[in-house]
Image (cartoon, coloured by chain):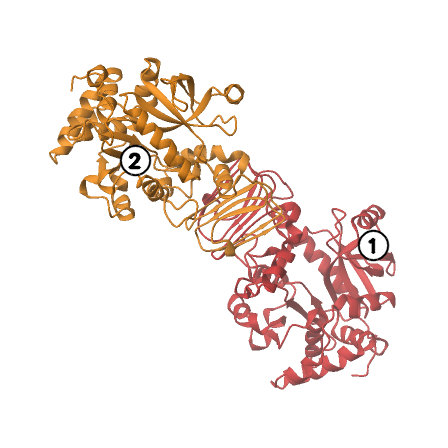
Chain colours: A red, B orange
Amino acid sequence: MASTHTNHSSSPTADPEFFAVIPAGGSGTRLWPLSRSQEPKFLLDLLGTGNSLLVDTVTRLEPFADVAHILVVTGSAHEAAVRKQLPALGATGVLVEPSSKNSAAAVGLAAYVLARTSPEAIVGFFAADHVVANEAVFQETLRAAIHAAHSDRLVTIGITPTEPSSAFGYIRTGDAHAGSAVVREVTEFVEKPSFVDASRYVASKEYLWNAGIFVGKVQTVVDAFEEFAPELAKHLSEAAALAERGESMEGAWSAIAAEAFDYAVAEPAARAGRFLVVPGDFGWRDVGDFASLAQAQNGGQTSDVIVVGDSAKVHPHDSSGIVVGTSGRIITVLGVKDIVIVDTPDALLVTTKEHAQNVKQVVEQLKEQGLNNLL
Amino acid sequence: MASTHTNHSSSPTADPEFFAVIPAGGSGTRLWPLSRSQEPKFLLDLLGTGNSLLVDTVTRLEPFADVAHILVVTGSAHEAAVRKQLPALGATGVLVEPSSKNSAAAVGLAAYVLARTSPEAIVGFFAADHVVANEAVFQETLRAAIHAAHSDRLVTIGITPTEPSSAFGYIRTGDAHAGSAVVREVTEFVEKPSFVDASRYVASKEYLWNAGIFVGKVQTVVDAFEEFAPELAKHLSEAAALAERGESMEGAWSAIAAEAFDYAVAEPAARAGRFLVVPGDFGWRDVGDFASLAQAQNGGQTSDVIVVGDSAKVHPHDSSGIVVGTSGRIITVLGVKDIVIVDTPDALLVTTKEHAQNVKQVVEQLKEQGLNNLL
């Protein structure tokens, strides 16, 4: 476990094994009361495709990874639901975290588990709750990233920005990598900027959105943990060993600091020149709040009333916005603009698109009031 | 039945019998989905007093009329609910209309039924769904009206306007009646005016709101029907005779034209100089839509969120308006102004105070769509 990234600069293989890891955590509180702690965003059929975002994510990766090579990392609260939605995942296809420790732990646990059997395989990490409109371009982009990962570098996929969003982190791109037409060096990962900075980033064309997608050799990922987050690495390595023996991870797990992967590993690794990036323009969306859900439903249009659920139940008059109905009731909307209505069996939210980001604070207040059964 | 109002100018008695008639009809569609055709406004505890508007109306009249002298006129669809809410009403305390024929028929049926046994009694007519804030002033005003009715004139109670409303009809007042400090002649009943005309009316101090309350000797009321609506009078007289014998009114009833009492009787009677008026300033409200319900709940204030129902279930943040909750769900409201939210078990309405009057049109559209189970 003392290896560093320089010890593993093996040459690219033509057809390495590929594993897809899907950390499935986060409750999506800005989508409350649709998204709940017991049924978070990734388990929901948010776009009315008939499948949850998680199932859509697995389906999207099937051209790259047999189901036996797909690993979902989730909390114990969601294991049953994940297995129910994805019965094809075997016993070892779901890695269950004893408690939520943020993204560095979820990514690292999967990497260390894979390292025990397949250190030379390529692994990709993909959020469980993102939306991709153009699957063909996604596949082309991922193929390029996997190819670039043969170089023993970590490779992220950066999304070509469509607007100066302050909701995402950014990736600053540098020179072309080894003469490639698509792969570039990463100069740095930048945390969520102000709108003004975001506007500057987008205008410069130097920056891409950080979608949290990255690819690398398993050993390269593990090496990055060893080098940039040695304390995490130690506990994750122990946890993976326990998991492999079918023993409880609790002891090792409780010692793990809850850190974001970007902060603990990706940012320092990028500063040390370890990251490459492949730009991708495949209609990616992080449906983070109801305003973006309305956009995702409506192909970017913002007029009229977008319905998520049974549109026959929704009766809009002289109104615009989004109505999400899961209660089965008739919903009549009259003379309201940019409204957000989320109608579930036990909770109703009425707000506006402008306030969509603040739903998170509402949920925090409900939590403070002890209304945990609604969260 | 051929008597006219001039045949019955008997002198006032000191303590005549008093009957209170409460026509309980109308579905209150502007209060949908709270008010339904099967559970209209008058059956609802609209103000959270613990009683329906109908029960509050009966209670308000008890200082004047023993329960045996209270008559509710309602449709067959509501008989059971009325009897359940008012078990003290005897078998003859509820007059059931075979079908809805507007207010002239409801008023006239009660008058003709009472005329068969108590033509010299005084009868007062009171809407089933109005709100009175100041009971003491109401009693004082009604006492003056009953006193004035001894003169064999019809006596209406006119509400001192608090604003230039275009939602009510107006009563134009004339000279003081026989030197009275409170009773005035009625010059005319005016239909709902434009806002401009209403402003002029209120500024002139000559006009009062028509609250549909009026008092008269039973025979005087009947005489007015004979004189001004002889066709209605004929069928109503037949219907009352059938009702007294416990026989079906259907035949006589079906011949009755559906006319408003104001149009068929009160307006021509006023033009003929038959009406007196007692002004009343007792915090009267016709809670006709959600904007006025919010006002009634909040003592005229319009800021913040007014809750009708369990306020512990409503969580407002940076919002104003009214939330009516009967579904038992948690309702969270974030960043919306002058909003109207009506949350019932099978239907949800979201609109604004500005559009409160238009709810009626929404209900008409639902009807056209055949969604009668929701109306």
Query: Where is the N terminus of chain B found, in terms of image quarters?
Result: top left
Q: Is residue A230 left or right of residue A286?
A: right
Label 1 amino acid? Ala
Return the x and y of residue A201 as percentages of the image width and height: 83, 50
Separation of marks 2 and 1 at Cα, in angstroms = 85 Å
Under circle 2, the secondary element is strand
**Residue found at x 59% / y 59%:** A53
Subunit under mark 2: B
For label 1, the residue is A181
Front-most of A167 and B64?
A: B64
For label 2, the residue is B22
Front-most of A224 and B325?
A: B325
Q: Nearer the viewer, mark 2 or mark 1?
A: 2
Query: Where is the C terminus of chain B found, in terms of image quarters?
Result: top left
Dividing the picture into quadrants, the one containing residue A118 is bottom right
Q: Is residue B325 left or right of residue A18?
A: left
Return the x and y of residue B66 as percentages of the image width and height: 25, 41
Contact between marks 2 and 1 (CB within 8 A): the answer is no
Circle number at residue A237: none
Above or below, A24 against A239 in this view is above
Label 2 amino acid? Ile
**Residue found at x 69% / y 70%:** A102
Whether residue A310 is visible to the viewer of this picture, yes or no, is yes
Subunit under mark 1: A
